[in-house]
């Protein structure tokens, strides 16, 4: 487990370095483009993995390869834009995930996770707290996406890259810390799960939603 965590940490640091160098136009552009488009291509093939037709999967692979071949010269000149799209897309997707659970009578995402930890009998204060936290995370992702867009359009690339590629992780950590302090203020000890428990609940909820969407 420790070895896996160390490996994940090294990969993350390598990704941050590559993202920052690529966004600021330093280093081998072909490598930076490959790193930038890899998550997008992976996301496409994760969706396509649900398809039963091998022919459709093959056609998709050929289409992706052809599109990358045609666009590669342009992508080499727009590496920062690729990383901006990644940053914006991830934040908007997470904002939609949290925000959608607050609409239309649905159960807030953090409330659903809390039920996975404590069972169905959540107290009124826990229901109120988990709904507020769901709103807070929605606002955080929307705000960070807005700041990223403003910096990308108005600031030098170095300034935007520091925010998007270097500071996003620490900002997430700060948000977790503030949420933990808030939790200590409004919930009694027996209703306050630890970080490891929260992560496990998130994984269980993610697996449950994935299973619900499988054919």
Image (spheres, grey):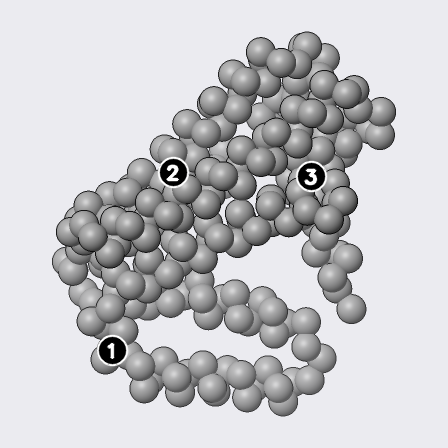
Mark 2 Cα shell of 10 Å, populated few (<14), some (14-19), many (≥20) = some
Q: Secondary structure at mark 3?
A: loop
For this view, does 48 lie left or right of residue 114?
left
> Is residue 1 something that shows in the picture?
no
Q: Secondary structure at mark 2?
A: helix
Mark 3 Cα shell of 10 Å, populated few (<14), some (14-19), many (≥20) = many
The quarter of the rendered structure image containing the C terminus is: bottom right
> Separation of disc 3 and disc 2 at Cα?
24 Å
The quarter of the rendered structure image containing the N terminus is: top right
Residue tagged by mark 2?
A: 169
Between discs 3 and 2, the one toward the N terminus: 3
Given contact means CB atoms under 8 Å apart, are the residues at marks 3 and 1 in contact?
no
Q: Is residue 89 above or below residue 170?
A: below
Q: Position of residue 154 (x, y in %)?
A: 20, 52
Q: Nearer the viewer, residue 9 or 189?
A: 189
Q: Position of residue 63 (x, y in %)?
A: 47, 86
Residue tagged by mark 3?
A: 108
| Residue 40 image-quadrant placement | bottom left
């Amino acid at each position: 487990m420790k070895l896996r965590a160390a490996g994940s940490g090294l990969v993350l640091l390598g990704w941050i370095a590559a993202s920052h160098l690529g966004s600021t136009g330093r280093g081998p552009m072909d490598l930076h483009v490959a790193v930038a488009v890899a998550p997008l291509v992976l996301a496409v093939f994760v969706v396509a993995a649900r398809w039963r037709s091998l022919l459709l999967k093959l056609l998709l692979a050929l289409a992706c390869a052809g599109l990358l071949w045609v666009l590669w010269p342009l992508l080499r000149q727009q590496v920062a834009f690729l990383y901006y799209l990644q940053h914006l897309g991830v934040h908007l997707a997470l904002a939609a995930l949290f925000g959608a659970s607050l609409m239309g009578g649905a159960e807030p995402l953090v409330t659903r996770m809390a039920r996975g930890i404590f069972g169905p009998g959540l107290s009124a204060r826990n229901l109120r707290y988990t709904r507020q936290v769901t709103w807070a995370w929605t606002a955080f992702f929307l705000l960070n996406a807005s700041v990223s867009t403003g910096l990308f359009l108005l600031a030098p690339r170095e300034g935007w890259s520091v925010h998007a590629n270097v500071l996003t992780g620490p900002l997430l950590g700060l948000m977790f810390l503030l949420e933990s302090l808030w939790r200590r203020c409004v919930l009694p000890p027996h209703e306050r799960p630890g970080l490891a428990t929260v992560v496990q609940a998130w994984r269980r909820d993610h697996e449950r939603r994935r299973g619900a969407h499988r054919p």
